[in-house]
Image (cartoon, rainbow, N blue to C red):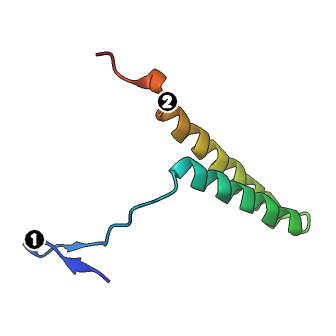
Amino acid sequence: MISHSYGGMLRRPRFRQVEPLEDRLARAAKRLRNDARLLPLGLAREQALRKARQTETAAHLSDWLRSPGLRPPK
């Protein structure tokens, strides 16, 4: 359901995520790898494995960006 906001623009409803992004990405990567194992050798399997690697990379990047080492000096 889309609700109206001020000025006549439409807004999407907001959802509060309970699980951190890194955990959701890691779970998705694991699912993609498991799905790829069930596929025969070929393009579809390679695409699933590539998507799993990209998802794992996104999880690591997000974790790295949130690390305390990247905080601006006080």
Residue 5 lies left or right of residue 38; in this view the side is left
Q: Is residue 59 above or below residue 43?
A: above
Image x and y of residue 60, in percent: 60, 39
The residue tagged 1 is 6
Residue type marked 2: Ser
Tell which residue pokes out farthest to the left in this image.
Answer: 7
Left or right: 47 as drawn, with respect to 57: right
| Pointer 2 residue | 67
Q: At label 1, which amino acid type do we have?
A: Tyr
Marked residue nearer the N-terminal end (2 or 1): 1
- What residue sits 73% from the left and 61% below the top? 32
Under tag 2, what secondary structure? loop
In the picture, the quarter occupied by the N terminus is: bottom left
Question: In what quadrant of the picture does the C terminus appear?
Answer: top left
Q: Quadrant of residue 38?
A: bottom right
**Tag count:** 2
Residue at position x 46%, y 26% in the image: 68
Q: State the separation of the CA atoms marked 2 and 1.
A: 37 Å
x and y, in percent, of residue 27 in the image = 66, 56
Give the image quarter of residue 29. Answer: bottom right
Q: Secondary structure at mark 1?
A: helix
Q: Report crowding for label 2: few under 14, some 14 to 19, many 20 or more residues within 10 A (C-alpha).
A: few
Q: Position of residue 72 (x, y in %)?
A: 34, 21
| Residue at 38% from the left image edge and 66% from the top image edge | 15
Position of residue 25 relative to residue 67, above or below, is below
Determine the residue located farthest toward the right in the rendered image.
41
